Structure formats: C-alpha cells, structure tokens
Image: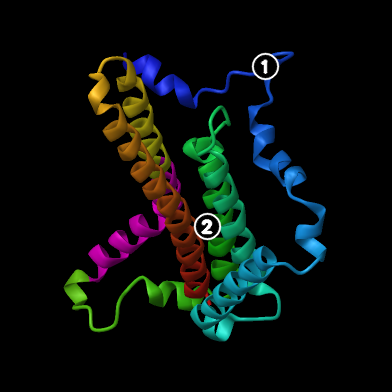
Amino acid sequence: MMSNLFSIFDPSTNILNLSINWLSTFLGLLFLPYSFWFIPNRHLIIWKFILMKLHNEFKTLLKNNYFQGSTFIFISLFSFILFNNFLGLFPYIFTSTSHLSLSLSISLPLWLSFMLYGWITNYQHMFIHMIPQGTPTILMPFMVLIETISNIIRPGTLAVRLTANMIAGHLLMTLLSNMGSIIPSYLIMFLIFTQILLLILESAVAIIQSYVIAILSTLYSSEVN
C-alpha cells in the first residue's frame, strides 16, 4: 500500500531510459500566452505588483549588501518554485518540487556560493559571526561548534522543508481521492467539499513555501557580508 501511495511521485515517462518528466519544470513556460508578457492586462499588473513588493522586501533584508539587480536572483527563485508548486497541483503533471534531487539542487549551490563568497572576501566577519556577542569564554568552543553545524545543515533544511510540504499535501489529496469508491454515496459531496478545501490549502502552501525559501536565501546572503 505504501509503495503504491508514494508511487505518485515517481517519474513514469521514459524515452531511451531517460525520464522526460523533469522537462515539465521548464516546458510549462511555453504554455503562457504571448500577450501575458507584452500587452498590459490585469494578470500582468498583479504579477508586477507582487514582484515589486518582493523587490522592496528583499532590498530591505539585504541592507548594505544590496546592489542593482541583486534581488533579481531571489525573485527568480521565488517565481521558479512557485510555478513548479502550482504546476504539480494539476492532475497527471509531474511534481518536481516534491523531490529532494531538485530542491537540494537549488539550495546547495546557493548556500555554497554564499559560504565561499563570505569566507574568501570577508573571513573576519564570518569568524565573528560564529560567536554571538556576550558569549561567556567557557561556552565559546561550543558556540563555534553549534554555529558550524547550523550553517552546514542549512541547505538540507531548505530542501527538506520544501519537499516535505509538497509531499504531505499530495499524499492527503491522493488518500482522499482513493476513498471515493469505498465511502457511502451520501458522503460523496462532503468528500468533494473536503478536497476543494484541501486544494485551496495546498495552493496557499505552494505560495508560502516559495516565499519562505526566497526569504531564507536572502537572509543567508545578508549574513555573509
């Protein structure tokens, strides 16, 4: 039962032993209307409003580290994750963000680039950051160890947070959909109503997780300088 339940996350389309399900991560952009990008409409206006809000928030978080175009990285990260989260809510579409291979491929290079930049360009600040101000001398070695472990597990926590939230919601929707053939007929409407509420909840989770990943990445970037 468990293997069948989790099989909804398995890539199932193969050509020459190469899974093409991962192409859904990028090919969905081809389905967006051409006019969406160039002709002003209410959807474009709302999207630009959201991006400007994110730009101002990321700019505030980066503080002295802000330079022209630096927020574009995190806005692009937010847009990419949000797009894939929503794409996975549609039936028979591969959910790439429910796999650690994708989420870790996003978080690990970001974290590694932040760490390399910080230790190469401003190593004194990185050393100082390991010991919070006012730490007793006897606790300093332990604080260095704790901060080191905390920094090392950051890409893992980012990846697991995104993957676990996507998997949990999809499993709940799958379990509810499988109950349709075994529950009494008078409870069908209640089941449909529950699935609609769960779909709304998953839509909110898709937005929140995209925002959390982008915000945490911005904070990690602001710490290295």
Amino acid type indicated by mark 2: Trp
Residue at 40% of width from left, 34% of height from top?
Answer: 170
User: Which tag is nearer the camera, tag 2 or tag 1?
Assistant: 1
The x, y position of residue 211, in whole percent, is 48, 61
Residue 14 numbered mark, or none: 1
Q: Magenta part mainly helix, strand or loop?
A: helix
Report if the CB atoms under discs 2 and 1 are less than 8 Å apart. no
Q: How far is mark 2 from mark 1, CA to CA?
A: 32 Å
Image position of 161 with respect to 125: above or below: above
In terms of secondary structure, where does tag 2 sit?
Answer: helix
Label disc, if present, on residue 111 of the rendered structure: 2
Residue neighbourhood size for the residue with mark 1, other residues' Cα within 10 Å, grouped as few (<14), some (14–19), many (≥20): few
Closer to the N terminus: mark 2 or mark 1? 1
Disc 2 crowd, CA 10 A, few/some/many (<14, 14-19, 20+): many
The residue lying at 53 percent from left, 30 percent from top is 91
Instruction: Answer whether residue 158 is visible to the viewer in this image.
Output: no
Residue at 33 percent across and 21 percent down: it is: 180
Question: Residue 92's x, y, as percent?
Answer: 56, 27
| Image height of 211 relative to 30, above or below | below
Magenta region? 140-163
- Three-letter code for the amino acid on which mark 1 is drawn: Asn
| Residue 117 locus on image (x, y percent) | 60, 67
Quadrant where the N terminus is found in the figure: top left
- Specify whether residue 56 is painted magenta: no
Between 11 and 221, the one lying in front of the other is 11
**Looking at the picture, how far across and down is residue 42, in whole percent?**
66, 67
